[in-house]
Amino acid sequence: MARAITPGRKAVNTAIGAGIGILIFFPILWTFLTSFKSEATAIADPPVWFFFDWTFENYGAVQERSNYFRHFWNSVIISVGSTVLGLLIAVPAAWAMAFVPGKQTKNVLMWMLSTKMLPPVGVLVPLYLIFRDWGLLDTRTGLVIVLMLINLPIIIWMLYTYFKEIPGEILEAARMDGAGLQSEIIYVLTPMAVPGIASTLLLNIILAWNEAFWTLNLTASNAAPLTAFIASYSSPEGLFYAKLSAASTMAIAPILIMGWFSQKQLVRGLTFGAVK
Amino acid sequence: MTTATLPQSRVRRSWWHRNQIAVTPWLFLAPGILFFAVYVILPIFQSVGISFTQWDGLGAPEPVGLANYRELWDDPAFYTSLRNNVIWLLLYLLAIPAGLFIALFLNQTVTGIRIYKSLFFFPFVISQVVVGLVFTWFYDPAFGLLNIMLGWIGLGPINVLGDPAYVTYGIILAGLWPQTAYCMILYLTGLNAVNPELIEAGRLDNAKGWRMLRHVVLPQLRPATFIAFVVTIIGALRSFDLISIMTNGGPFGESRVLSFYMFEVALSEYGFRMGYGAAIAVVLFLIMLCFIAYFLWSMWREEQGR
C-alpha cells in the first residue's frame, strides 16, 4: 500500500516490527543459547544472555546418552522415502484431476482434504493392529508407508493447485502435433511442473520430518527418528535444561538449515501455491 | 517451441490407443483413491465394529452391544475432553486474525521485511515436540522464564501446566506460536498480490481503516483465508502431540482432549480397552463429520459464488 509515511512513523513501525520479530524468534534463540550453557547457568535468575562460559559439554552428553546420528539417519530415510513414494502416487492423481476434470473432481479433492482433518488417533488402533500382524512395528518401512498415507492429501492438493496453473492449451497443442500421452507427460508437462513438484517435495519432507504422533506411537528404538530422540528428553530429564536445549538444537538444526536455503520454494509450498 | 523436437509416436488403432486419453485419468487416480480407502474408510468401519465389543486387542472380541456408548454417556472424563476440544478449536482460530493483523502492520513500509519473513518462518518448520519441550521449560514454576518475569513485577509463581485452570490455555498458547507465524506468512504473501489500483479506488471512495480492510483488502485475501482456515483447523485437531509432550493429559486428566483420552483408554498403560476407545473414536468421527461437512460446504459455496 503505497502511502506517504513520515520518516518518524516509519522508524516507529520498524521498531515495533523488530519487536514482534524478536518475540516470535525468541524461543528458538533462547534454546540455542542455553544449549551452550552449563546446567547451573541455564537456570540462573536473572537469566544470563550472551556472557557466560560457552561450552560444548551438553552436546557430548546428549550424543553419549543416545546415538544422534542413528536417529538422524532414520529421519532422513523416513521423510525422504515417504515423500518420494507419495509423489509417485500423487503426480498421476493430480494430473488426472487437473487436466481431465470430471463432475466429481472437486468433491474427490475436498474429500481427500477432509480426511486430513480427522484425528489420527481414530485410525491408530486399526493401523496399530495391522502393523503388529504384518511385523511392521518399529520398522522404517512401516513409517514410510504411514507418513506417505497421512501426507498424501496435502501432496495431491498442492500438486493439483500447481498443475492447474499450467494452461491446458499447451497440452492440446502438443497433442495436435502428434504427441502421445507418454511424450506429452515427459516432454511438455514435466518441465513445466518441476518448480511445483520441488516445492511440494520440500514442504512434505519437512512435514514428515516433524511428524510426531505416528513416529512416537509406532516405533520403539530401531526405527525411531529425531522426534522420538527429542521426546525422550521430556520427563525423566526434565530439569536438565541445558542438555534438553542441546538435544532440541540438534534435532531442529537440519530442518532449519534446509529451510533457510529453500525459503522461497517453501513459502510457495506453505501457501499451497494458492496464494501468490 | 518444444513441439518440434517431439518424437513422432506411431499411430496404432488399438483400443488402448483410441481410449487412452479417457482411461488414463482413472488409472492415474486409482492408486491414490485405493490408499485413501485403506487408510480412511477401512479403519472407520473397523472402529465402528470394535466399538460394540469388549476387547483387549489380543484375545477374541466379546460383543457387548451398546454398553461402551452407555458408559461414555456417564463418563465425566469424556465431557472434560470434549470441552477442551471446543476450547482448542475456538482459541486456535485466533491465530488467523492475529496473523492477519501482524501481516497488515508489517506490510506498511517496515524496513527489512525479508528478514522478518525468515524469522517468522522458523517456528513453523520446527517439530511440535520441540515446541512442547521449549514451552514446558518456559512455564517451569521454578526455573522457567515466565515465572522469572512474573517475579520482576512481583507476582507469585504460577505452575501453568500443573494447575487444572490454566493447563489447557498454556498448551494452546504453545501451539498458537507456530500457527500465528504461519498465518502471518500466508497473509504477507497474499498481501503482495493485493491490487494497488483497487486500494486507490477505495481511497477515492473515502474508504479508510476498517472499511477499507473489510470491503477492499479482505475479499482479495480470500484464497489465503481459505488455506489459513484449513491448516488452522487441522492444527487444532493435532493437539495430541503437544498434550502428550507437555502434560500427558494431566493434571488429573484436565488437559485431555478426546483423541488423547481415546489413546489413554485404548493403547496406553492405563489399559487396553480397545472397545471403549473405539467408541470414543466413533463419537469423535461423528462430531468431526458434521463439522467438516458444514465447513467444507460453506467454503465451497463461497468459492462457487465468486
Image: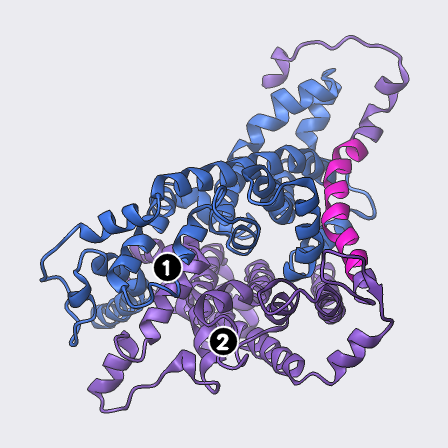
Chain colours: A blue, B purple
Q: Is residue B129 visible?
A: yes
On the image, the x and y values in percent for residue A144 come to 57, 40
Q: Position of residue B189 (x, y in %)?
A: 46, 55
Comparing B45 with B201, the one in front is B45
Residue A243's image quarter? bottom left
User: Taking A197 as reference, is A210 above or below it?
Assistant: below
Predominant SS of the magenta segment? helix
Amino acid found under the numbered disc labelled 2: Ala
Residue B123 horizontal/vertical position (percent): 39, 59
Mark 1 lies on a secondary structure that is loop
The residue at which mark 1 appears reads as: A233
Q: Nearer the viewer, residue A99 or B219?
A: A99
At mark 2, the secondary structure is loop
- Find the magenta span and give its range: B25-47
Say if the magenta span includes residue A199.
Answer: no
User: Mark 2 = which residue?
Assistant: B207
